[in-house]
Image (spheres, grey):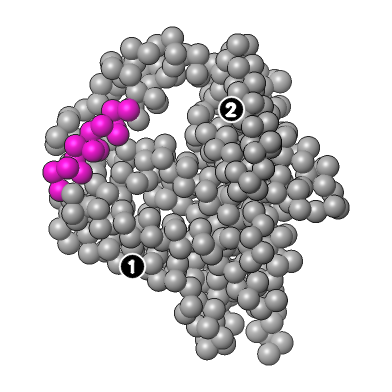
């Protein structure tokens, strides 16, 4: 029994290390969650572990979606190497049951969230140093350890965590709220990407509307508008990108290769993805088929001889591959997960807001499939289901 407890404790330590590695190193995160799975396998107590995952409807919906991806390989138009590559990118979600079976206590979960925030603080400070030392040149200063899309999404999540915990605690209340504001400033004034600020803005609107306080809702909207006017007026950070997008509105048609090309790219992807979906709406073209079908139908995009591997939208990429059946299953999974994330006394939880933020981010990036977003999703799903189990025990 003592050995089992020691292995479980070691697994919980790896859980914290995984949260620390997530914004800093995907290789480190890969290693730590693999070690978590090993600890779960070695610790035994399978009847108890089965009791932790059996009642989780969200897990069964996730498993059904992954089975659908496996079936999609059988009729896909992609070469087998591509089918296996795409299947593998989604199957990292199979780590979730292992982390749920580890079942770390609330103390361990809070420590993991603290580690995640600490790692994002490191990212933010390095971004400031890069700007101060003029090291970032033409790259985004928040592209420290990941690309600016993944990095900015992580910073938005850290802002949510600090804000929610700052509102719900008396200890370190102002420190957490100031830290949340610090992450917001980094996202608006240092980051040039649009996904992180979009997640941040709509996530905070969700918080104030969830609290059903219209005074706070109006104040938040006004503050967001003021912040956007400042960054656009003074051409700072995200404002520089938005100004370029406004000045080069012709890029929406021509898809020219400059800083606003990401808007044009998404507009073209979305339009063309809808066209593909209309051709095979029910079950799609199969796992890994997006790249082949897009190129076969539309050729190279206007901005360069690159075969697009995904349409920068999780919902479109799933629907093109698995049809409306796959999309409905994925949306049912997200709905079930959202219900699991709601606090028992209906307070707004950090997990709930992060999930809403993630689903918003999936509108402009294929986060579920990509390594950074996908591994964050593994962490988030696990946190939600573990918190639900802990709430049942208490």
x then y, percent, for residue 380: 55, 57
The circle on residue 191 is: 2
x then y, percent, for residue 374: 46, 52
For the N terminus, which image quadrant? bottom right
How many callouts does the rendering have? 2
Q: Quadrant of residue 160?
A: top right
Label 1 vs 2, first from the N-terminus = 1
> Disc 2 on helix, strand or loop?
loop
Residue 294 visible in this rendered orientation of the protein = no
Residue 290 visible in this rendered orientation of the protein = yes
- Is residue 115 positioned above or below 337 on the image? above
Farthest-out residue, right: 171
| Closer to us: 58 or 237 | 58
Residue drawn at x 30%, y 50% as measured from the top left: 318
Q: Is residue 335 magenta?
A: no
> Disc 1 on helix, strand or loop?
helix
Q: Which residues are magenta?
A: 267-280
The circle on residue 64 is: 1
- Is residue 232 positioned above or below 153 on the image? above
Q: Mark 2 Cα within 10 Å, few/some/many (few <14, many 20+)?
A: many
Residue drawn at x 18%, y 54% as measured from the top left: 282
């Amino acid at each position: 029994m003592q050995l089992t407890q020691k292995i479980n404790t070691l697994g919980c330590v790896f859980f914290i290390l995984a949260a620390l590695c997530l914004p800093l190193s995907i290789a480190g995160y890969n290693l730590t969650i693999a070690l978590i799975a090993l600890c779960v396998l070695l610790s035994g107590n399978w009847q108890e572990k089965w009791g932790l995952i059996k009642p989780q409807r969200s897990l069964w919906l996730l498993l059904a979606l992954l089975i659908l991806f496996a079936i999609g390989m059988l009729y896909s138009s992609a070469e087998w190497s591509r089918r296996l590559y795409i299947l593998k990118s989604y199957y990292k979600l199979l780590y979730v049951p292992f982390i749920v079976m580890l079942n770390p206590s609330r103390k361990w979960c809070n420590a993991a969230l603290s580690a995640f925030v600490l790692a994002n603080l490191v990212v933010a400070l390095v971004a400031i140093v890069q700007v101060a030392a003029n090291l970032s040149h033409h790259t985004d200063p928040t592209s420290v350890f990941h690309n600016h899309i993944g990095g900015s999404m992580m910073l938005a999540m850290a802002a949510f965590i600090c804000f929610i915990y700052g509102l719900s605690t008396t200890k370190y209340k102002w420190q957490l709220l100031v830290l949340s504001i610090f992450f917001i400033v980094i996202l608006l004034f240092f980051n040039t990407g649009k996904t992180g600020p979009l997640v941040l803005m709509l996530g905070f609107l969700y918080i104030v509307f969830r609290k059903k306080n219209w005074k706070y809702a109006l104040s938040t909207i006004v503050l967001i508008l003021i912040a956007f006017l400042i960054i656009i007026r003074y051409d700072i950070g995200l404002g520089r990108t938005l100004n370029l997008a406004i000045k080069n509105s012709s890029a929406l048609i021509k898809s020219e290769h400059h800083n606003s090309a990401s808007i044009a790219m998404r507009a073209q992807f979305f339009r063309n993805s809808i066209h593909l979906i209309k051709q095979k709406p029910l079950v799609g073209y199969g796992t890994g088929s997006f790249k082949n079908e897009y190129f076969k139908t539309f050729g190279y995009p206007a901005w360069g001889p690159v075969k697009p591997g995904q349409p920068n939208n999780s919902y479109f990429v799933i629907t093109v591959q698995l049809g409306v059946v796959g999309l409905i299953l994925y949306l049912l999974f997200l709905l079930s997960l959202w219900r699991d994330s709601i606090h028992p006394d209906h307070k707004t939880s950090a997990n709930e807001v992060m999930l809403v933020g993630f689903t918003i981010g999936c509108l402009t990036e294929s986060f579920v499939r990509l390594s950074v977003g996908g591994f964050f999703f593994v962490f988030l799903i696990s946190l939600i289901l573990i918190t639900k189990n802990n709430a049942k025990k208490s």
